[in-house]
Image: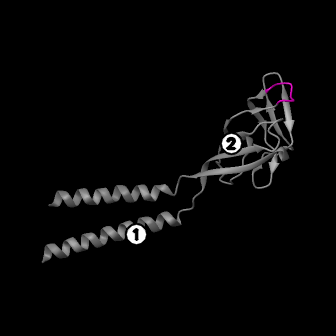
């Protein structure tokens, strides 16, 4: 009889712990830190598409040059150089970037070009990292409860 009550109480607390963990996971703000900006060219026969990865340290969801961690490069068929591998200026684009410039500026070791931001359409893909932490804690806690319960038997 007592063993049945103890097992029922253990099951109740286990379910309550899992429900609490899921509730906390839903309440945690999902601020993205690792972000990818994809710029798709509207004139692909002249200028190519590109991607920029950045660490959104200030959590504003906007790209700025000091947050850039990767750049795919951009090709240009009418430019002096065929491929520009360095991003040196980011324009202000409402809801996309707060770089302070008027255009995208791309460099090679010998050539620099500036291109108006209206040449591309933009999409930002965010990776929400903090929301997974409560789920991980819940899984580890559940394993701990199962192991401790097994040891008691």
**Apparent side of residue 142 relative to residue 7 in the rendered image (left or right):** right
Residue 137 forms part of the magenta stretch: no
Q: Main secondary structure of the magenta part?
A: loop
Regarding mark 2 in the picture, which secondary structure is present there? helix
Vertical side of 130 occupied by 71: above or below: above
59 or 78, which is in the foreground?
78
**Residue at the farthest front position:** 45
Q: State which region is magenta.
A: 77-82
Q: Residue at x 74, y 44 (%)?
A: 39
- Report x, y in % for residue 64: 73, 45
Q: Taking 36 as reference, is 3 left or right?
A: left
Q: Earlier in the sequence, mark 2 or mark 1?
A: 1
On residue 19, which mark appears?
Answer: 1
**Scheme of colours in the image:** one colour
Q: Residue furthest top?
A: 110
Q: Which mark is residue 135?
A: none
The residue that appears at 84% across and 29% down in the rendered structure is 112
Between tags 2 and 1, which lies in front?
A: 1
Q: Which residue is mark 2?
A: 67
Q: Which x, y percent locates residue 62?
A: 72, 51
For residue 68, above or below residue 76: below
Packing grade of label 1 (10 A; few <14, some 14-19, many >=20) is few
Q: Is residue 73 left or right of residue 32?
A: right
- Whether residue 111 is situated above or below residue 23 in the rendered picture: above
Residue at 34% over, 58% down: 141
Where's the N terminus, which quadrant?
A: bottom left
Separation of marks 2 and 1 at Cα, in angstroms: 37 Å
Which of the 4 quarters of the picture holds residue 105?
top right
Residue at the far left in the pictured view? 1
Residue at 57% x, 61% y is: 29
């Amino acid at each position: 009889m007592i063993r049945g009550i103890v097992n029922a109480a253990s099951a109740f607390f286990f379910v309550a712990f899992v429900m609490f963990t899921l509730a906390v996971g839903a309440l945690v703000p999902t601020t993205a830190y690792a972000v990818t900006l994809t710029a798709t060219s509207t004139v692909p026969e002249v200028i190519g598409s590109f991607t920029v990865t950045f660490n959104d340290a200030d959590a504003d969801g906007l790209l700025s040059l000091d947050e850039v961690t990767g750049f795919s490069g951009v090709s240009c068929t009418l430019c002096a150089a065929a491929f520009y591998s360095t991003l040196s200026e980011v324009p202000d684009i409402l809801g996309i970037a707060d770089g302070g410039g008027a255009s995208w500026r791309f460099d090679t070791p010998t050539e620099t070009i500036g291109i108006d931001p209206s040449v591309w359409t933009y999409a930002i893909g965010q990776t929400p990292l903090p929301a997974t932490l409560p789920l991980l804690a819940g899984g580890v806690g559940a394993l701990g409860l199962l192991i401790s319960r097994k040891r008691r038997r």
